[in-house]
């Protein structure tokens, strides 16, 4: 009996011991580690001079990992061959940098790690650590700082490079296309301000670049650019503001090709509006052609008839100061048939046109075979205007609120380029009640005119627009309920459109101002917004 009691006591004691040990090891028993890692030492030391090695080691007081090092690490001046940074994956108590480039003499280099260094357990970042060294006798210590903003959009993109190009006897404006900059920094993913550090005294070109392929050179087709108007002198107390913009792409013609019977596609880059296509080959007297633009792609279609006996055609393409010639192989292929598409469907706006687009060029429109009737079966008068390049008829007619309109197109009303015609077509569109919409009145104080005033949605798409020539209230009527922003383009040249900048021509983009509305637009309700501009 006494032995059994001792066995029970022993069992309870051991159980209590296990419970106590288990409690000591439970997760969450202590405060979360929010302390970033710290550097113990660097080999060579940070801010070393007479640097002459190809390997750097930076030791930490705990295990660290590198996150997004390819995006976060900025090396200034840039190196032609990227150094190898370890650890590549996993954790380590030190970072190793292996340099492959031949370093420039008497030059200060800076490795800015951004937010890439984090402790291994909690991910606490060791933010904006910079390792700096000089191959010369001293560390350059001058700085250039400022801010970067998007010239057109409300929000500025992240990871924008800001660079300095040294202006010496060999300097040319084209350097941004061919060479990497002398000094560089990056706004990373959270800032719109910048500071370029460890610069030597001198004259520089200051440029911002949204570099989408990571080569530190400007590619007009893919990159955005910003530039300061004048060469800057360092040192300087000036804080610079750079406006980032997308250049209009220079015109380029793409070799044409036959797509279908008597239909040749001429691809292009840039603005097609001054693009001319001329057939140089001999053609019969009854030869006809039309040129239309593809609805979605950057292509012009050259349509012709009748069929030609030749196996190739000779064309010339011109555009302002551009000129080139092409030989296009042709063959006997099936022609496109006439297909009609219409828009909008369902709801139509009071000031919106009903549109008819053809898959082949329109040749004629018999308005006697076209009719519009409202819900009371009353005929509605209309006018039809052809946009020959877009190959679209705009049907304009007066509309009343809460109405239904039945549109009927009888056979052979529309005739296509190859003598195809339509079958009977019927469409129905409706208008909303005026009370379903809201309106906004905008007053502008100290604005510069002319100005393009736009209401935009959350994606920046234009939902309503007025062109203002003088200071007077602007009324935006029949607005669908929702949240809008206001964008004002200061149209300096009065051409009624936004003009972007051009680096080589030293043209800055037109100024754009953004405003938030005081509240959302509601049905059957009006808002008055007053925009205050800086008189300077």
Image (cartoon, grey):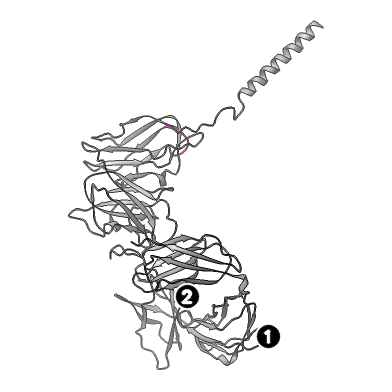
Q: Which quarter of the figure is the C terminus placed in?
A: bottom left
Classify 10 Å Cα crowding around label 1: few (below 14), some (14-19), many (20 and above).
Answer: few
Classify 10 Å Cα crowding around label 2: few (below 14), some (14-19), many (20 and above).
Answer: some
Q: Position of residue 224 (x, y in %)?
A: 37, 59
Q: Is residue 183 or residue 460 the one in the foreground?
A: 460
* Label 1: element kind: loop
| Residue 18 shown left or right of residue 3 in the figure | left
Residue 77 is at least partly visible in this image: yes
Identify the residue shown where x is 39% and y is 62%.
Answer: 533
Res 376 label: 1
Q: Which residues are magenta?
A: 88-94
* Quarter of the view holding residue 231: bottom left
Q: Residue furthest right?
A: 1
Q: Give how far apart the Cα atoms at labels 2 and 1 are.
A: 39 Å
Q: Is residue 447 or residue 509 the one in the foreground?
A: 447
Q: Position of residue 85 (x, y in %)?
A: 38, 39
Residue 227 vertical placement versus 71 (above, below):
below
Q: Is 91 part of what is drawn in magenta?
A: yes
Q: Is 467 part of what is drawn in magenta?
A: no
Q: Position of residue 201 (x, y in %)?
A: 21, 46
Identify the residue shown where x is 28% and y is 65%.
Answer: 505
Res 527 label: none
User: How many numbered discs, if any?
Assistant: 2
Q: Is residue 71 or residue 316 the one in the foreground?
A: 71
Q: Which residue is mark 2?
A: 294
Q: Is residue 281 or residue 30 the one in the foreground?
A: 30
Q: Position of residue 413 (x, y in %)?
A: 57, 89
Residue 334 is at least partly visible in this image: no
Identify the residue shown where x is 33% and y is 46%.
Answer: 195
Among the two numbered marks 2 and 1 on one chain, the one whose residue lies closer to the N terminus: 2
């Amino acid at each position: 009996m006494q032995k059994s009691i001792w066995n029970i006591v022993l069992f309870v004691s051991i159980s209590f011991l296990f419970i106590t040990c288990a409690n000591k090891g439970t997760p969450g028993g202590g405060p979360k580690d929010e302390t970033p890692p710290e550097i113990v030492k660097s080999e060579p030391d940070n801010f070393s001079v007479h640097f002459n090695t190809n390997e750097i080691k930076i030791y930490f007081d705990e295990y660290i990992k590198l996150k997004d090092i390819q995006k976060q690490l900025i090396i200034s001046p840039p190196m032609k061959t990227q150094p190898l940074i370890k650890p590549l994956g996993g954790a380590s108590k030190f970072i190793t940098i292996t340099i492959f480039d031949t370093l420039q003499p008497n030059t200060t280099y800076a490795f800015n790690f951004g937010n890439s260094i984090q402790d291994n357990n909690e991910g606490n970042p060791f933010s904006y650590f910079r390792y700096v060294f000089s191959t010369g006798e001293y560390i350059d210590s001058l700085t250039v700082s400022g801010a970067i903003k998007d010239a057109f959009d409300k929000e500025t993109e992240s990871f924008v490079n800001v660079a300095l190009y040294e202006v010496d006897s060999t300097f040319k404006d084209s350097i941004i296309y061919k060479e990497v900059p002398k000094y560089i920094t990056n706004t990373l993913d959270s800032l719109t301000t910048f500071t370029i550090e460890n610069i030597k005294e001198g004259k520089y070109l200051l440029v911002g670049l949204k570099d989408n392929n990571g080569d530190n050179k400007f590619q007009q087709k893919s990159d955005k650019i910003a530039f300061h108007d004048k060469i800057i002198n360092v040192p300087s107390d000036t804080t610079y503001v750079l406006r980032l913009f997308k250049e209009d792409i220079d015109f380029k013609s793409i070799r044409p090709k036959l797509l279908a019977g008597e239909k040749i596609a001429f691809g292009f880059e840039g603005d097609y509006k001054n693009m001319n296509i001329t057939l140089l080959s001999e053609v019969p007297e009854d030869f006809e052609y039309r040129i239309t633009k593809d609805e979605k792609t950057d292509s012009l279609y050259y349509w012709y008839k009748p069929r030609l006996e030749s196996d190739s055609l000779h064309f010339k393409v011109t555009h302002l100061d551009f000129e080139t010639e092409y030989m296009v192989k042709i063959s006997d292929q099936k022609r496109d048939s006439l297909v009609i598409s219409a828009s909008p469907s369902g709801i139509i706006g009071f000031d919106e046109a009903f549109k008819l687009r053809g898959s082949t060029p329109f040749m004629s429109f018999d308005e006697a075979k076209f009719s519009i009737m409202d819900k009371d079966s009353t005929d509605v008068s209309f006018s039809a205007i052809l946009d020959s390049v877009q190959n679209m008829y705009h049907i304009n007619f007066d509309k009343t609120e809460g109405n239904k309109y039945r549109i009927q197109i009888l056979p052979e009303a529309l005739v296509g380029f190859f003598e195809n015609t339509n079958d009977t077509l019927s469409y129905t569109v409706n208008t909303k009640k005026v009370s379903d919409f809201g309106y906004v009145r905008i007053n502008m104080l100290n604005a510069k005119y002319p100005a393009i005033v736009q209401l935009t949605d959350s994606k920046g798409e234009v939902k309503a627009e007025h062109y203002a020539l003088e200071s007077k209230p602007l009324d935006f009527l029949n607005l669908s309920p929702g949240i809008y922003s206001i964008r004002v383009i200061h149209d300096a040249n009065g051409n009624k459109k936004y003009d972007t900048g051009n680096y080589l021509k030293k043209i800055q983009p037109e100024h754009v101002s953004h405003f938030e509305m005081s509240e959302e637009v509601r049905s059957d309700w009006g808002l008055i917004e007053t925009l205050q501009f800086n008189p300077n």
